Image: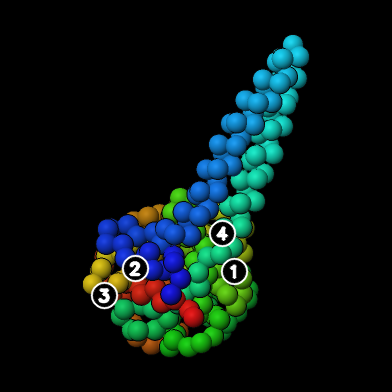
Amino acid sequence: MSRTIRAALAIACSVAALTVGATTAHASGDDAARATAKDAREAAAKATGKGSAEDAANKAAEAAREAANRARTASDAASDKGDTVRLQVASSGKCLGVDSASKDNGAAALQWTCNEGKAQQWRAIPTVDSSFVLRNEHSNKCLEVENSGTQAGARVQQWGCTGGGAQLRWRMVLVDPVNKLYQLRPMHTPDRCVDIDHGKKDDGVKAQQWYCNQTDAQLWRILPVA
């Protein structure tokens, strides 16, 4: 079991964040941010010594840009190390996958009998705010809420992992530490949860977002993929 998943399953607070992977990205970003300030000060000091305020400003700006690029590179490298998991809903014991293993934008997320297929595998990639992007291992697309909808009943689907919008990021909230059950809450409307319509147990029932209510249709096990 990966470090990130072990950390998540050990958290007994209301908001769980699988923080080990995120800590790596945060640490890299913090180091680069400190380098930005240091480089900017050093560049300004050198330029000021030559008596040119304009040169000082230009050199400081260039140093800041270089350090910011280092921060982005470090963060991207850490994010690519996210852990692969299955998401199993408590109500039916089925796993969250993509309809017909489609690779298309807009393909619906749904429950299906758990299997070894990559359409049911999600790479949980930590982001800077302790949320996660959930990227499907089969399609390389990300779990999101259709059209960034905030209404109850909005469809959960896959879409290209670009832009970093809040509708592509998810919090994993621990609500049952004994059984290790989590809610999946979209960052753009955090009082909603990924839900299986009416708690149905059939294969093919589509996922939606709904008012968070802690019923089994909204509680998920996070199962690491070996």
What residue is shown at x 65% (from left), y 51% (from top)?
73
3 vs 2, front mark = 2
What residue is shown at x 61% (from left), y 45% (from top)?
71
Q: Residues within 10 Å of mark 2 (few under 14, many from 20)?
A: many
| Distance CA(mark 2)–CA(mark 4) | 20 Å
The tag earlier along the polypeptide, 1 or 3, is 1
Q: Secondary structure at mark 1?
A: loop
Circle 4 residue: 79
Name the spot of residue 22 as percent of width and height, x first. Answer: 47, 56
Residue 182 horizontal side relative to residue 72, left or right: left
Amino acid of disc 2: Leu
Asked which quadrant contains residue 118, the reply is bottom right
Amino acid of disc 4: Ser
Q: Are marks 3 and 2 in contact (CB under 8 Å)?
A: no
Q: Are marks 4 and 1 in contact (CB under 8 Å)?
A: no
Q: Secondary structure at mark 4?
A: helix
Amino acid of disc 3: Asn
Name the spot of residue 209 as percent of width and height, x first. Answer: 39, 65
The tag earlier along the polypeptide, 2 or 4, is 2
Circle 2 residue: 9
Amino acid of disc 1: Lys
Q: Residues within 10 Å of mark 3 (few under 14, many from 20)?
A: few
Q: Which mark is residue 141?
A: 1
Circle 3 residue: 179
Q: Is residue 169 above or below residue 123?
A: above
Name the spot of residue 68 as percent of width and height, x first. Answer: 64, 41
Q: Residues within 10 Å of mark 4 (few under 14, many from 20)?
A: many
**Camera-side residue of 82 and 207:** 82
**Camera-side residue of 154 and 65:** 65
